[in-house]
C-alpha cells in the first residue's frame, strides 16, 4: 500500500488558519509568482494565468496551492501554456523550510533550471505535492563538484508526493559521476505515482532515478529511453526501491512490472500519450490497463484513460482509487485506530477515506470546505471494530482544498485533500 504521508493536520488548527484562505492571481494581482507566494498564507491558492514566467522561486515555508488554471478547468493545455522558466541561472523551485504536503504545485511546465542539486525542483527537509507538471530540459551540474544530482527533482530527507508528471530530457552531471537525471533521492521515501520518465540522462548513475539510503515507492510509472553508464533507468545504493505495476526498460522485479516498448504516440514531437488502435493508431500500448488493479483512470477519453479494466501506466493514467486496501492488508483485529490516507489525493471527483477501528465506537466522518463549513456528513453512528471505508464524490463542487475529519471516542484526526476540476 502507498504509505501514509499525505495532507495531515489537526482539524482545530486547520480551521483556525484557514478562515482567511484566499484565491489569488498572477499576474492580475501580483506581477510575479514569487510576489504572490510571499503574500500568501494559511492555505491560499495562487492561480497563475497562461504565459512564461522567468523566475527562480522559493516557497519559504509557506503552505499554499500554486497552480495554473489547469486546477480550475481540468484542461491539460494550460500545463503546456503556463511555463516557469529558470533562465538557466538557478533552480526553478525550492522547498527547504519544512514545507509539508500542504504545499502543492500543479499544472506547469517547469524548465531551464540549473543547479548543482535539483535543477527544476529542490526538496530538502520538506515534503510537498508535485503533480500534473511537465518537468523538461533542466540541468544539475556544477563547476566545483564532480557531479550534479537530481536534474528534475532532488529529494533529501523528503517524503514528497510526485504524481502524474511528465519528466523528460533532464541532464545530471558534467564530466562524470552525475546522479539522477530525473529524480535524486537521499534519505527520502517519496511516493512516485503515474509518472513518465523519458530522455533523462546522466554520465554517472541512474538515468531516471537515483536512490541512496532511501525507499521510494514507485507505482504505475513508465521508465523508458533514459540513459546512464550505471542504471539507465534506476540505480540504488542500500535497499532497492519498491517498484510495482510499472514499465521499466530492461525489466525490474516486482508485482505487475513489464518490460515492453510503451508505444508513445509521437515522442519526437513531445507527445507521450499512449497509442491506441481505438483512436486510429497502429498499436495498442502495452501500458493500457496494465497499472495497479486498485486504481482506475480518472477519465476515459482519447488522451487519458484508454482502457476500462484497470489504470494505464504513465503520466496520463490513474487518478481514481477504487480500494483503500486489499483484503490481505486488512488486519483481523487492529491494535489501535489508524487512518489510511484518502486516495487518490489530489483527485478528480471521487476519493476513498478508510480507517481501522480497534474496538467498536460511534464514529463521525465529515467533509468541510476550506473555510471550515461542513458540507457533507458521510457517517455518524456506531461501527464495529475492523476496517471501514467511505467514498466521497465531489462532483458538482468547485476544485480546491477540502478537509475531512474522522472522530471516535478515542481518536480524532483531520486531513486536507485537493479536488482537481
Image (cartoon, grey):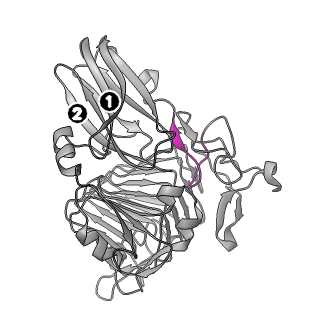
Seen in the picture, residue 39 relative to 233 is either above or below; the reply is below
What's the magenta region?
A: 311-321
Q: Give the Cα separation between the discs numbered 1 and 2.
A: 11 Å
Q: Nearer the viewer, residue 13 or 162?
A: 13
The image shows residue 247 at horizontal and vertical percentages of: 59, 51
* Disc sitting over residue 366 in the figure: 1
Q: Quadrant of the N terminus?
A: top left
Question: Which residue is tagged 2?
Answer: 413
Left or right, 125 with respect to 107, comes to: left
- Whichever of callouts 1 and 2 sits on the residue coming sooner in the sequence is 1
The image shows residue 81 at horizontal and vertical percentages of: 55, 72
Q: Which residue does the image show at 47% across and 57% down from the upper left?
A: 71
Say if the magenta span includes residue 320. yes
- Main SS category, magenta section: loop
Q: Which residue does the image show at 38% across and 69% down from the upper left?
A: 25
Marks 1,2: beta carbons within 8 A: no
The image shows residue 348 at horizontal and vertical percentages of: 50, 45
- Secondary structure under tag 2 reads strand
The mark lying in front, picked from 1 and 2, is 1
Q: Residues within 10 Å of mark 1 (few under 14, many from 20)?
A: some
Q: Which residue does the image show at 57% across and 44% down from the upper left?
A: 298
- Secondary structure under tag 1 reads strand
Residue 54 lies in quadrant: bottom left
Seen in the picture, residue 357 relative to 298 is either above or below; the reply is above
Q: Which residue does the image show at 51% across and 32% down from the upper left?
A: 322
* Residue 330 visible to the viewer: no
Left or right, 268 with respect to 298, comes to: right
Amino acid at each position: 500500500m502507498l504509505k501514509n504521508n499525505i495532507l495531515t493536520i489537526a482539524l482545530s488548527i486547520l480551521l483556525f488558519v484557514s478562515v482567511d484562505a484566499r484565491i489569488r492571481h498572477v499576474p492580475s494581482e501580483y506581477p510575479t509568482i514569487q510576489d504572490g507566494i510571499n503574500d500568501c498564507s494559511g492555505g491560499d491558492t495562487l492561480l497563475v494565468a497562461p504565459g512564461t514566467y522567468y523566475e527562480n522561486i522559493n516557497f519559504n515555508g509557506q503552505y499554499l496551492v500554486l497552480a495554473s488554471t489547469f486546477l480550475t478547468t481540468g484542461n491539460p493545455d494550460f500545463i503546456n501554456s503556463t511555463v516557469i522558466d529558470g533562465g538557466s541561472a538557478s533552480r526553478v523551485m525550492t522547498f527547504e523550510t519544512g514545507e509539508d504536503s500542504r504545499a502543492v504545485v500543479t499544472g506547469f511546465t517547469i524548465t531551464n533550471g540549473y543547479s548543482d542539486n535539483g535543477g527544476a525542483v529542490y526538496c530538502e527537509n520538506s515534503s510537498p505535492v508535485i503533480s500534473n507538471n511537465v518537468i523538461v530540459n533542466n540541468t544539475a551540474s556544477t563547476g566545483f563538484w564532480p557531479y550534479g544530482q537530481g536534474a528534475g527533482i532532488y529529494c533529501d530527507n523528503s517524503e514528497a508526493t510526485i504524481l502524474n508528471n511528465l519528466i523528460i530530457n533532464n541532464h545530471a552531471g558534467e564530466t562524470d559521476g552525475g546522479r539522477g537525471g530525473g529524480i535524486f533521492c537521499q534519505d527520502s521515501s517519496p511516493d512516485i505515482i503515474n509518472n513518465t520518465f523519458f530522455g533523462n540522462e546522466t554520465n554517472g548513475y541512474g538515468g531516471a532515478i537515483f536512490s541512496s539510503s532511501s525507499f521510494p515507492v514507485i507505482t504505475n510509472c513508465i521508465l523508458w529511453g533514459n540513459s546512464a553508464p550505471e542504471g539507465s533507468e534506476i540505480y540504488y545504493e542500500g535497499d532497492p526501491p519498491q517498484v510495482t505495476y510499472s514499465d521499466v526498460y530492461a525489466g525490474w522485479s516486482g508485482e505487475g512490472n513489464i518490460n515492453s516498448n510503451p508505444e508513445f504516440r509521437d515522442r519526437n514531437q513531445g507527445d507521450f500519450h499512449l497509442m491506441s488502435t481505438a483512436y486510429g493508431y497502429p498499436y495498442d500500448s502495452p501500458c493500457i490497463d496494465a497499472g495497479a488493479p486498485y486504481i482506475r483512470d480518472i477519465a476515459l477519453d482519447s488522451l487519458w484513460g484508454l482502457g476500462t479494466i484497470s489504470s494505464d501506466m504513465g503520466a496520463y493514467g490513474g487518478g481514481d482509487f477504487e480500494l483503500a486496501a486489499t483484503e490481505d492488508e486488512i488486519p483481523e483485529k487492529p491494535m489501535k485506530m489508524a487512518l489510511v490516507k484518502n486516495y487518490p489525493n489530489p483527485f478528480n471527483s471521487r476519493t476513498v477515506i478508510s480507517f481501522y477501528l480497534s474496538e467498536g465506537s460511534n464514529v463521525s466522518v465529515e467533509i468541510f470546505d476550506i473555510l471550515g463549513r461542513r458540507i457533507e456528513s458521510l457517517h455518524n453512528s456506531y461501527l464495529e471494530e475492523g476496517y471501514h471505508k467511505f467514498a466521497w464524490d465531489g462532483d458538482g463542487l468547485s476544485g480546491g482544498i477540502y478537509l475531512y475529519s474522522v472522530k471516535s471516542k478515542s481518536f480524532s484526526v483531520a486531513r486536507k485533500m485537493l479536488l482537481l476540476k
